[in-house]
Image: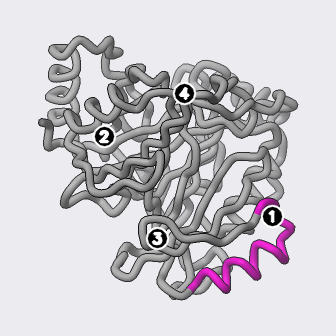
Amino acid sequence: MLDQIKGLHHVTSMAADARKNNDFFTHKLGLRRIKKTVNFDAPDVYHLYYGDEFGTPGSVMTYFPFPDIGRGRHGVGEVGTTAYSVPEGSLGFWSERLTAQGVKGIRQDASFGENRLEFDGPDGESFALVESKSDGRPVWEKGGVAGDEAIRGFHSASLRLKDGGATEELLKFMGYENVDSSGNIKRLAVKNGNGADVIDIETIPGAPFADLGAGSVHHIAFAVENREKQLEVRKALLDTGYQVTPVIDRDYFWAIYFRTPGGVLFEVATHEPGFDRDEDTAHLGEALKLPTQHAHLREYLEKHLQPLGD
């Protein structure tokens, strides 16, 4: 069993409208936009990052907003709900806030002994806020939500699968342990992690396979401290028979990718070099930052990309 993985690093999804996406995360959820850049493979499409003040691994939601892309179809073989951690007793505040903001699909329930507020993103993606008694992670306090109610970072993510057995074994190999179960959901967690420690496996044998589009999670990334730890994980996965990409420079972290038995795309990403490598922490996410290979397109992209309405 590996011990290099410390929880989630980021979750990357797809959207249909960059301005609505930016508004949802920065104004409705009160998160910080920590990076405004472009897709490495499609530079005429933004890659937007949202998180805490510093873009700490375990807090970062990222999006590819493809203009006018069709809505994805939810099903198995995908990440289901991405859940954020909020302070105990804050769900009443969040229910009122999200309702006033016109957020759809708001519903309150409890799962695994935790109070949850579920709601939909602008493209029908599934989110939840989960009350935590002991999450002391720092927050972004300039997003319009007070510190005693603000989002702390990720709590968990769920995987919707036809058969969860092989993915469960993979997660155990990656350092996760079974901690609980409820109905068709098994909960796994990594000990001594970064706060974004939990993965829920939801087994739905009769559901159709998901179809990628707006509102779909493209991939889910797990955090390791540095490239040395990442190479250890890569070798272990290769030795186990997984087809893993070479290490790829994503400017703000180094990444490897592989497809899981249930069809979900996993990434393992480093903490280094961080989101402050090309702009001061005080100004994260303000200027358009371009990968070196796309720097020559700046004039075109600044005219072509949709204004975010900061």
Q: Alpha carbon of mark 2 to alpha carbon of mark 1: how far?
A: 33 Å
**Residue at 32% over, 16% down:** 244
SS at circle 1: loop
Query: Counting residues from the N terminus, which is met first, the one under dot 1 or under dot 4?
Result: 4
Amino acid under disc 3: Arg
Which class describes the residues within 10 Å of circle 2: few (<14), some (14-19), or many (20+)?
many
**Which is more N-terminal, label 3 or label 1?**
1
**Which of the numbered marks, if any, corresponds to residue 103?**
1
Q: Earlier in the sequence, mark 2 or mark 1?
A: 1
Name the mark on residue 77.
4
Question: What type is the residue that disc 2 sits on?
Answer: Thr
Check residue 118 for magenta coloring.
no
Q: Amino acid at mark 4?
A: Gly
Measured in 3D between alpha carbons, the distance from the residue under mark 2 to the one under mark 4, in whole angstroms, is 25 Å
On the image, the x and y values in percent for residue 183 come to: 46, 51
Question: Is disc 1 in contact with disc 4, using a CB cutoff of under 8 Å?
Answer: no
Up/down of 205 relative to 235, above or below? below
Q: Residues within 10 Å of mark 1 (few under 14, many from 20)?
A: some
Q: In the rendering, at what x and y percent does residue 300 appear?
A: 79, 27
**Which region is colored magenta?**
90-105
Residue, disc 3: 152
Name the residue at 83% across, 41% down.
Answer: 306
Is residue 132 placed above or below 280 in the rendered structure? Answer: below
Q: Please, what secondary structure does the residue beneath circle 2 have?
A: strand
Viewer-side residue, 290 vs 299: 290
Residue 26 on image: x %, y %? 68, 63
